[in-house]
Image (spheres, rainbow, N blue to C red):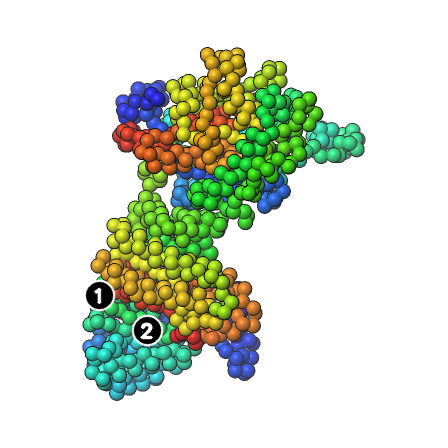
Amino acid sequence: MPRRPQTPTTIPTTPAGTPAHDAGREAVIVGGNRIPFARAGGAYANASNQDMLTAALDGLVARFGLQGERIGEVVAGSVLKHSRDFNLARECVLGSSLSPQTPAYDLQQACATGLEAVIGVSNKIRLGQIESAIAGGADTISDAPIAVSEGLRRALLKASHAKSLSARIKAFASVRPADLAPATPRTDEPRTGLSMGEHQAITTATWSIGREEQDALAAASHQNLAAAYDAGFFDDLVTPYKGLVRDANLRPDSSVEKLAKLSPVFGTSLAVPATMTAGNSTPLSDGASVVLVASRAWARDHDLPVLARVVDGESAAVDYVHGHDGLLMAPAHAVPRLLARNALTLDDFDFFEIHEAFASTVLTTLAAWEDADYCRTELGLDGPFGSIDRSRLNVTGSSLAAGHPFAATGARIVATAAKLVANRAAETGKVSRALVSICAAGGLGVAAIIESAASVPGADAATTGGAL
Amino acid sequence: MSDSYVSLVNGGLGGTVAKKLGLPRPGVLRRQTPDAPFAPGPVLVLGSPASADADAVAQLILTSDGGADLDIRRAAAGASARWGAVVVVLSDVEHPRDLAAPMLDLSGALRALAPGGRVVTISREATSSDTPSVAAARQGVDGALRSLAKELRAGATGNGIVLAGGVDLTAASVGAALRFFLSPRSAFVDGQLLTVSSVAGEAPGSWDRPLEGRVAVVTGAARGIGAAIARVLARDGARVVVVDVPAAGEALAALANEVRGTALQLDITAPDAGERIIDHAVSRHGGLDIVVHNAGITRDKLLANMSPEQWDSVLAVNIGAQLTINEALLASPAFTRSPRIVSLASTSGIAGNRGQTNYAASKGGVIGMVRATGPLLAGVGGTANAVAPGFIETEMTSRIPFATREVARRLNSLQQAGLPVDVAEAVAFLAGPAAGGINGEVLRVCGQNLVGA
């Protein structure tokens, strides 16, 4: 791939009005931390998003000795969020061991929140606006916000604005018994009323993805995650929380045979046999994760390791409402565009981290890339985008085994990918690359390229010469 | 976990009742606080009349950091306050009869010893190459000190410094040991004789932060004694890497943030644990100077009922892992700046304990290991020593049934259990730059426990 020039620039020579950034600046991943993911109503039943994200931050601080450190920016979010958590990331910073002078903002892009946060802070680092950042997210099903009904909400607002007692009583008089039922959070698509599972069931049927291959992917996820834990892979990626040491959803003894016994839960009203079960769909989960991203100079000045660099990211969206693409097919669009921009092909990657919202999401994406028609008509390519080597897919497990607390998945995957490429590069002495792809509600998808960075030639010259 | 009996008998009514009934009346121990003086009153230095060694010790205390603020006397006459400490210099005794004058002078001073006061003897090691009368006099000090320690009350302690191999009073570690025994840092060390065997070591730049600029690793640091060690090493200026198994990561992270160090989740029985520890310390903190082998487990069973798993796991964690990690340390160029290894033994490893054959084998093993490892480090100014805790108030001992625990607490000269910080202070002392002349030794922190002391 083409490398950006590594020549250093200095502030004094930068003309006024020109961004004071070095085109050779890199955003490197120092490491990550997450708490084990719990099943909804499980170990974290009494933990809030703020509790979990603070725990994830504090674990990262402890791992890298960042106590009292002023980080350039902390960017995180959650998908199911209380209105009181309007400043979630900032509140977590204040509750953590980081310097209280660390700025923060919330970001939300459904399940892509964490990955979008990583891309966002990486861009700021590459621009020279900040030297360090923490990106991540948290989500809880157990502590999800429950709102009052629309009728009661209007009455309460009207009463709060009322000037007299009689006006207040009048406001409440409009409340009907049905209005007293709470409004629970919905993950259904607002424009279709269908759940994500039902949407994916349609896509699964369209692409004729079989039950057996979905179960095989789910079993592999569990087996890979368990093996990675046993090998100590997560020793420096996960910090236990509230007594949970490993992901609660993990079933090391999972197998295709066991998964085959589960009844389908999505797509049961479709014309074709339903294939999606609780075993090959992600469970509702609670958790939080963060990634430490920095400039190379910052990492060096703090004696911190450099695992990988964030090369590039691409977002895509599909028209699942009126068009013929499935709700979770946006990554199929994002990845070809991302790779084209970076002059890479699927063969250039050692690892593929494709978020397992459902086993069939991964499988439909792979099928789409192999389908000449789809690639021509939907992606505007000349022919099939390509196939991936399945042995490079989610090698340390993914969301089916670990669970999927929506906004926490991005940082989990990025930290894992960074460590994978760093280890591979250390073994082979060659640059190693991982492709990260995450689908999200609303027909969204985000992809990113993570590349090993420990031994990039000339990198030191680029950073030591930088005036930032 | 707290010992409410100690506060009860140190209160007005409780104290009277306990005295009338002849119940044990443990004193309140004097513990380290910022700016604590190293003695709670004037210091009396005793020795044979006109002893040059006693004069030298008085001078040593006077000229040490903070010593100028102390009232140091060579004779008991005319003192108005109670003695903060009595140092008995017996390094020049040549016949048991030479013990009489200083010991009887000490006898006169004991009633005026302040609560939490200290008696410290300084003597020479008795060896087979001494003349019989010299050896008898020197070994006699040992018996006298241990007995005296059992007589002291109100939190006062008695300990001895033993000079070996021709080391003289000016050795850095003699001053450091004297300072440690006089100070509140040695609160739960009682009836112990600590040998200084070389002139190695140097006084720190600051006695308040003697570990400034040093990088320390503490294993098993997530809770209990390990956490206390990490806190005390950090208080003394060290940059601390706290290590524990991944499952203990939550408490470990909180501790790392408290002591402003870094957390390393690691199973110490992993074959590459030593390399990973060195790599972490060197890459993050620029070196590795102190390793505290604190991680340990118990799997108590009578030997007749012991399973191979129970035996093997205890030996693997408590001694096997230490040996493997030490091999890596000894081979590493990073571990050569007057390095320190301090390993946690146990009084069980010295005196034995029913139901703990596996544990005692591992802890006895630790004692043998440091004795053999010390000389391997001496070439680079390093040491390896062990600290053997007695009954310490921890989460582990709080699970002992009430009656057994009450009895166990009183079975030492201080009639109470120690605190994790007491063990930590001993570790920090041995890890300090001035303790370079103390090598291959075992320092017990047990309040002079009746077993093994």
Q: Residue at x 30, y 82 (%)?
A: B140
What's the CA distance linking mark 1 and mark 2? 18 Å
Lateral position of residue A183 relative to residue B389, left or right? right
Residue B235 rendering spot, x and y as whole percentages: 38, 56
Count of numbered labels shown in the rendering = 2
Position of residue B227 measured from the top left corner of the image (x, y, whole percent): 43, 56
Name which quarter of the figure residue B345 lies in: bottom left
Q: Type of residue at label 1?
A: Val
Residue visible at 50% across and 78% down in the picture: B24
- Secondary structure at badge 2 equals strand
Picture layout, residue B452 above or below residue A298 = below
User: Disc 1 vs disc 2: Cβ atoms closer than 8 Å?
Assistant: no
Report the residue at 37% width, 80% height from top.
B148
Quick check: can you spot residue B258?
no
Q: Residue B347's mark?
A: none
Quadrant of the drawing holding the C terminus of chain B: bottom left
Measuring from the top left, give residue A44's x and y in whole percent.
58, 44
Dot 1 falls on which chain? Answer: B
> Which residue is most to the front?
A257
Q: Label 1, on which residue?
A: B199
> Residue B35 versus residue A195: which sits nearer the camera?
A195
Judge the density around disc 2: few (<14), some (14-19), many (≥20) Cα neighbours within 10 Å: many
Q: Nearer the viewer, residue B175 or A39?
A: A39
Identify the image quadrant of residue B420.
Answer: bottom left
- Residue located at (39% from left, 71% from top): B350
Which residue has dot 2 on it?
B193
Q: Does residue A403 sit above or below B226 in this rendering?
A: above
Q: Position of residue B188 (x, y in %)?
A: 41, 69
Q: In this rendering, is residue B336 above or below A215?
A: below
